Image (cartoon, rainbow, N blue to C red):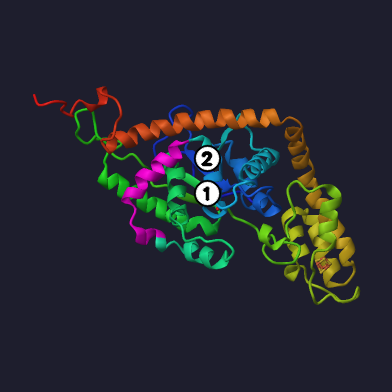
Amino acid sequence: MQDTQAPARNSSTPKQNASQGKQRILSGMRSTGKLHLGNYVGALANWVKLQDSYDCFFFIADWHALTTDYADTSQVKQNSVEVMLDYLAAGLDPKKCTMFIQSHVPQHAELHLLLSMITPLGWLERVPSYKEQQQNIRDKDLNTYGFLGYPLLQSADIMLYQAHFVPVGEDQVPHIEITREIARRFNSFYPKLGRQGDREPQHTYVFPEPQALLTPSPKLPGTDGRKMSKSYDNSILMSDSEPVVRQKLKTMVTDPARVRRNDPGNPDVCPVGDVHKIFSSGATLQEVYAGCRSAGIGCIECKSWAADALLKILNPIRERREHYEQHPKEAWEILENGAEKARTASEATMKEVRAAMKMTKGYQESAEIKVGSS
Ligand code: TRP
Ligand code: SF4
């Protein structure tokens, strides 16, 4: 798998996190339950690399899940736990990064509310996912305030940690764009104030404008050749057992031109070929190209090689997951410690937000407010 093109760490622009001297990254996934291979190659594998060089916060967006699942919330918590187990299984390490569940950090809701005051409705209505999802998800009524506000809640998630970079796929870019616009709007309404109530000369703004860190995601189709997606029932899960992985690969569609064993095929138009391109060694890939084009190998053999390559990656992932499934308390402790760290980091931002908006809580910080008539 390829490396992400992460910007140089010594780029001078954004404020650095004081404690570690590292720039900050935030990303998350909705509570969708067990993750599939597409989630792994498109996001998690990249996050695992990023945790070594950045101050990373990776969270599970259970409030975002409510924007579509509000009528039946019975699976949301279980789904959050499954996502957490897959984070750990992928190799996210609580010693290197902070992992938590969104609803454990109420500051997300507070910032979302404050941002909602300054967000023009038109900005939200123009986000492409809004109309798309309303058209695609027909079995749910998505004419809600919460669903319209989905991108704004995402903006709050990002801004709350004053994140510089947000590793996401192409589909999320409009959400990062609107976050930048909202950060700019907040900063212009509420510049940071110094002790004397005047503009601070340096660090004049509370929020950096975050940048998307596009994950180069190789094309990974599902078993039916369409994009891998839970709703298509064509996924290979990160937690699938070896026999299940082998079985799913056996049923995977192939180049339709190879009807009979001695028809030549083309790995570039075959979903199994795509699996090879991501997971197989160069030598195997060469054998696949040569064997497929000359009809020297059969699809059954080719698929078993693909399964071998896949399982090399998936076996250690499944073993890590099994460890936490057997020690659920350990996983919960990681989440609780993560939430604690996230609350500390986000409360620091909220203090700046409340001060900039002149909405501080304490008497001390309200010296300029006159109490009584004197
Ligand atoms: N919208 C993202 C998705 O569907 C999930 C998400 C919520 C997110 N908040 C975020 C991603 C903040 C990055 C940053 O995948
Ligand atoms: Fe696809 Fe492999 Fe069959 Fe070629 S040999 S069509 S790459 S499964």
Identified by mark 2, the residue type is Gln
On screen, residue 355 above or below 70: above
> What is the magenta range?
106-124
Residue 102: assigned label: 2
Left/right placement of residue 317 relative to residue 71 reads right
Task: Classify mark 2: helix, strand or loop.
Answer: helix
Which label's residue is closer to the chain start, 1 or 2? Answer: 1
Q: Which residue is mark 1?
A: 64
Identified by mark 1, the residue type is His
For residue 304, what is the image quadrant?
bottom right
Mark 2 vs ligand 1: CB below 8 Å:
yes
In the rendered image, residue 321, in percent from the top left (x then y), is placed at 74, 38
Task: Classify mark 1: helix, strand or loop.
Answer: helix
Q: CA distance from mark 1 to mark 2?
A: 9 Å
Q: Residues within 10 Å of mark 2 (few under 14, many from 20)?
A: many
**Residue, x 49% and y 29% (percent of image)?**
20
Q: Are marks 1 and 2 in contact (CB under 8 Å)?
A: yes
In the rendered image, residue 192, in percent from the top left (x then y), is placed at 27, 37
**Residue, x 82% and y 59% (percent of image)?**
249
Depth order, front residue of 179/336: 336
For residue 247, what is the image quadrant?
bottom right
Q: Residues within 10 Å of mark 1 (few under 14, many from 20)?
A: many
Mark 1 vs ligand 1: CB below 8 Å:
yes
**Outermost top residue:** 364
**Is 49 in the magenta?**
no
Left/right placement of residue 275 relative to residue 42 reads right
